[in-house]
Image (cartoon, rainbow, N blue to C red):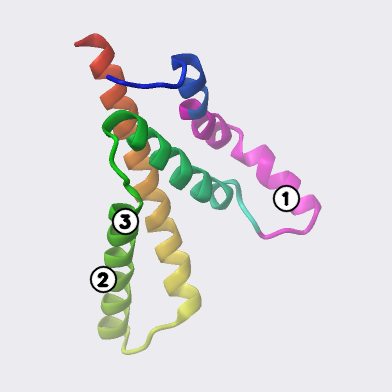
């Protein structure tokens, strides 16, 4: 494994989304006090895109942004197609809400897979 960033620094950025998810209830309460409809999960998505990009770049020396965009675009097209043919209409609010959840699930899964890859590379 050819990581150029110090290992502790990388692990901090790896565990930060997990810590934010653990305290998301308190973070969401703070957003409600300021009358924002944003949730902690919504804040994590851009962070996960950046951290996943940097992690893949450090581990494999490959630009992962095109692959992530293609994966998320295909999932959006599949959701839009399903909603259009199943309900005979596409309500954008419902579509984007569902798609944003799928984006989060894809990115957090990729994030965990990268962490497992790094942990296994240390063991092996």
Residue 68 is situated, as x and y percent measured from the top left of the image, at 32, 53
Q: Residue at x 51, y 20 (%)?
A: 9
- Nearest the viewer among 53 and 36 is 53
Residue 42 is situated, as x and y percent measured from the top left of the image, at 55, 53
Q: Secondary structure at mark 2?
A: helix
Magenta: main secondary structure: helix
Seen from this angle, which residue lies furthest right? 34
- The disc, 3 or 1, on the residue closer to the chain's N-terminal end is 1
Q: Which range of residues does the magenta coloring cover?
A: 14-37
In the image, is 33 to the left or to the right of 88? right
Residue 79 is situated, as x and y percent measured from the top left of the image, at 31, 71
Identify the image quadrant of residue 59.
top left
Q: Secondary structure at mark 1?
A: helix
Q: Residues within 10 Å of mark 2 (few under 14, many from 20)?
A: few
- The disc, 1 or 2, on the residue closer to the chain's N-terminal end is 1
The residue mark sitting in front, 1 or 2, is 2
Q: Which residue is mark 2?
A: 78
Q: Is residue 10 above or below residue 46?
A: above
Which part of the image, by quadrant, shows the C terminus? top left
Which numbered dot is residue 31? 1
Separation (CA) of disc 1 from disc 2? 32 Å
- Nearest the viewer among 99 and 122 is 122
Residue 119 is situated, as x and y percent measured from the top left of the image, at 30, 18
Which numbered dot is residue 18? none
């Amino acid at each position: 494994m050819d990581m150029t960033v110090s290992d502790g620094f990388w692990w901090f950025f790896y565990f930060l989304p997990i810590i934010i998810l653990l305290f998301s209830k308190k973070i969401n309460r703070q957003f409600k006090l300021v009358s924002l409809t944003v949730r902690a999960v919504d804040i994590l998505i851009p962070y996960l895109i950046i951290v996943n990009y940097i992690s893949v770049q450090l581990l494999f020396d490959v630009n992962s942004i095109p692959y992530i965009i293609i994966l998320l675009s295909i999932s959006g097209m599949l959701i839009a197609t399903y909603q259009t043919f199943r309900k005979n209409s596409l309500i954008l609010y419902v579509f984007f809400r569902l798609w944003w959840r799928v984006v989060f699930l894809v990115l957090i899964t990729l994030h965990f897979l990268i962490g497992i890859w790094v942990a296994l590379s240390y063991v092996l």
